[in-house]
Amino acid sequence: MSLQSLALIEKWPVPTAAAGVVRADGTVLGTHGPGGHRFPLASVTKPLAAYAVLVAYEEGAVELDEPAGPPGSTVRHLLAHTSGLAFDEHRTTAPPGERRLYSNAGFEQLGEHVAAAADIPFAEYLRQAVLEPLGMTATSLEGSPAKDGVSTVDDLLRFAAELQAPRLLDPRTVAAAMSVQYPGLKGVLPGYGHQNPNDWGLGFEIRDSKSPHWTGSSSSPRTFGHFGQSGTFLWTDPEAGAACVTLTDRPFGPWAVEAWPEFTNAVLAELRG
């Protein structure tokens, strides 16, 4: 099977784009574009970083409910964007657990917390805990764990298969990461405005009934993933039994708001036959 819908990326107003779809067993249903091209991930870095934090949790280096970040905050708060930290500044703007404040600073503090607990730089921890075991040899973290990952479609398809059938983590841990943390919180989804509720798991955004949204109108409410301001996204739709990775080198903007849902709907329609 080779998904014809992936060719829609050729119509996008971007210099370079690549996309692929994978099943839980690692079967790649199709790719389009340069699968080995290394793209800046922007915030698609966060799911990789979150997975490393969850490995640290299972290894006993950290606990999800131990203090981390601003006073009263925990590792769980930081992963779920409820620590109260500002978007890009290491200052607190709300008490922990009261609002969904999407925060790069929160993920930077997560990286510092795990690095201190494991006595190893976070980028190296990510490499040893996630990238190397999955064979993601073209992926690296070159700065902030919130936004400075670089990877390829080929590598991220390996990660997307892992999300569907975990080998590095207990499936119960992954199920918790894809479940809503602190239900009912309002928040802003960057690029899409206020959402009520603005549901997130542990490092992964959960689609639920959000509208507008960067996934498709036919995406199931259980869909989870992340998009990045560098024009990148990764979603997993459990009801479709597949995950999709799409990377570009044009910053997110109105072109993506228009193109991405149409693309996702076409991919899902082809998957469902």
Image: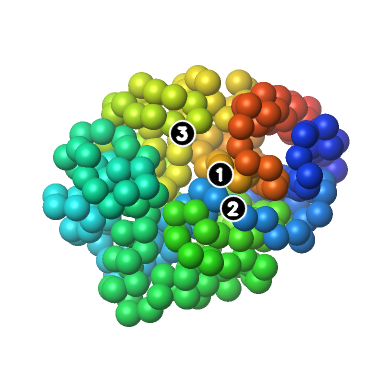
Q: Callout 1 environment at 10 Å: few (<14), some (14 to 19), or many (20+)?
A: many
Total number of numbered labels? 3
Whether residue 76 can be seen here: no
2 and 1 marks in contact (CB < 8 Å): yes
Nearest the viewer among 50 and 27 is 50
On screen, residue 22 above or below 272: below
Specify which label sits upstream in the sequence, 2 or 1: 2
Mark 3 highlights which residue?
A: 190
Q: CA distance from mark 1 to mark 3?
A: 10 Å
Whether residue 14 can be seen here: yes
Q: Residue at x 62, y 55 (%)?
A: 40
Mark 1 highlights which residue?
A: 228
Q: Residue at x 52, y 72 (%)?
A: 127
Among the 4 quarters of the image, the one containing residue 239: top right
Q: CA distance from mark 2 to mark 1?
A: 6 Å
Mark 2 highlights which residue?
A: 41
Specify which label sits upstream in the sequence, 1 or 3: 3
Q: State the mark number for residue 114.
A: none
> Seen in the image, is 57 located left or right of residue 46?
left
Q: Amino acid at mark 1?
A: Gly
Measured as percent of width and height from the top left, residue 162 is found at 57, 56
> Seen in the image, is 10 located left or right of residue 218?
right
Task: Indicate the secondary structure of the residue bearing disc 3.
Answer: loop
Q: Amino acid at mark 3?
A: Pro
